[in-house]
Amino acid sequence: MSRTRILVTGATGYVGGRLVPLLLRRGYAVRCMAREPQRLAGRWEKDIQYPGQLEIVYGDILDPESLAHALREVEVAYYLIHAMGDKRAHFEEREKAGARAFASAAEACGVKRIIYLGGLGKRDGATSAHLRSRHRTGDILRSGAVPVTEFRAAMIVGAGSASFEMMRHLTEKLPVMVCPRWIKTRSQPIYIEDVLAYLVAALDCPESAGRVLDIGGPDILTYRQMMEVYADIRGLRRLIFTVPVLTPRLSAYWINLVTPVPASIAFPLVEGLKWEMVCENAEAQRLMPVPLTPFREAVARALRATDERRVSTRWTGAIQGAIPPALDAILACCRPHELKRDVQQVQTRAPLPHLQRAIARIGGETGWYYADRLWAIRGALDRLIGGVGLRRGRRDPEVIVPGDSIDFWRVEDYQPNRLLLRAEMKLPGQAWLEFRLESREDDTRVLTQTAYYLPGSIWGTLYWHLLLPVHYFVFTGMARNIVKWAEEPERGALLSGSPAGHPGP
């Protein structure tokens, strides 16, 4: 059992969140770096094999002091950071600055190797801005003194990946598709488990250091062929037509309306599909002969994982851009008149586990317990103005961990008797929704549901007051219906068959 210390950056993301448990099961000492380390607390407890095996630390690639702390006594560092979906201007400059800072800090801390996951595509400049930035990131990391293993992959197929979810929703929802010419471009998709196998295999392959290794599945397909394979697996009949007029940006806006993937994520994905993404070398297979999964089998496995609720990470897990301030920090310093509140309290004799389960299953397929049509309208309006809307749903219908997305909210804190959601819809301010449970001596419980709102301007204040009647109507009904759901006798039967520590189905 190896006690090699490994740093994983991007541990809240789709790939990083799946890599960490694999490393833990192999006995490596793992340190996870995140801008919000509290989101990873307790995430992989069942995979820890010895005390002190897992550390979670704060770190930001643009903060040299935090990098020095995160990279201390690290032998191998995984660089799994990318600004996909980052709406801030000049993301390429920030990515370059981050790669330079990381390479410098790794050298100063004596790191022996960096393993980086980048993107396929020609390196001659004829590619998208995001792919060009990923290539440049690899170049910058390799320019330092620490040897780098750079894996380059195209579309990653797996339950919860943005690329797969985009393809799945397009094919499921549109019997007739009018698509741009990029659906005829060839690509070499790879199954997520095969990507992870390569990332882990590199640790035992010193020959991979200092190399750029293209990784892809055994099938080279156009995006049209991928959708046709998906439709065939699902037993769907689909008509696909191509037209020359849909630009990547128009395509991204259309995807924003039809799928859960917002335009900010869809645009770089679509833009990348304009360029052929096929492996240019087979060195990865020669050095690390990972058994590769055919595309059809990869799609089938991803669908089974989705149907069986085995989606451990999802594209919505990573937060792009600046981290908003936490509510608890705002409560500690904000003047009372600045923070608007809507407080609803309901007393009940419903058992505490029933109430906990009612709160844990909120959103997604369950809905919001009251006025779901109004929630749907709010979600649709959010999508129209470029927001995430409601269609992100949930990673799991009942199990929650901090950092999960729930429709257009993000879980900022979750404990048995507290759920705190941070709004990610378009707002002229910042908003939170908190649920607290309290047990009293007279054998009753109290649900306190609080909506917090911090206006960003005079328009934000006007927004709050204009919507006060709607908020009162919705939030009052929601709190009452949560309690009503928990009071129904059949909830006890549902909970009796639940696994320990998790709500029942």
Image (cartoon, rainbow, N blue to C red):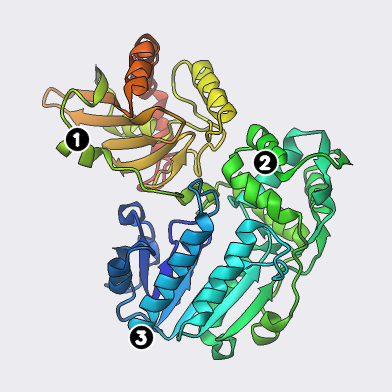
Sequence-wise first label, 3 or 2: 3
Distance from disc 1 to disc 2, alpha carbons, whole Å, reads: 38 Å
Point out which mark residue 110 bears. 3
Q: In the image, which disc is placed on residue 331?
A: 1
Q: Is residue 21 at least partly visible in the picture?
A: no
Residue 412 lies, with reference to residue 365, above or below; the image says below
Residue at (85, 38) in percent of width and height: 238
Where is residue 414 drawn, in percent x and y? 32, 42
| Rendering coords of residue 457 (x, y %) | 33, 26
Q: Quadrant of the N terminus?
A: bottom left
Distance (Cα) linking label 3 and label 2: 43 Å
Within-10-Å neighbours for mark 1: few <14, some 14–19, many 20+: few
Q: Which three-letter amino acid code belongs to the residue tagged 1?
A: Leu
Residue that numbered label 2 is attached to? 252
Q: Is residue 17 left or right of residue 481?
A: right
Which amino acid type corresponds to the residue marked 2 in the rendered image?
A: Ala
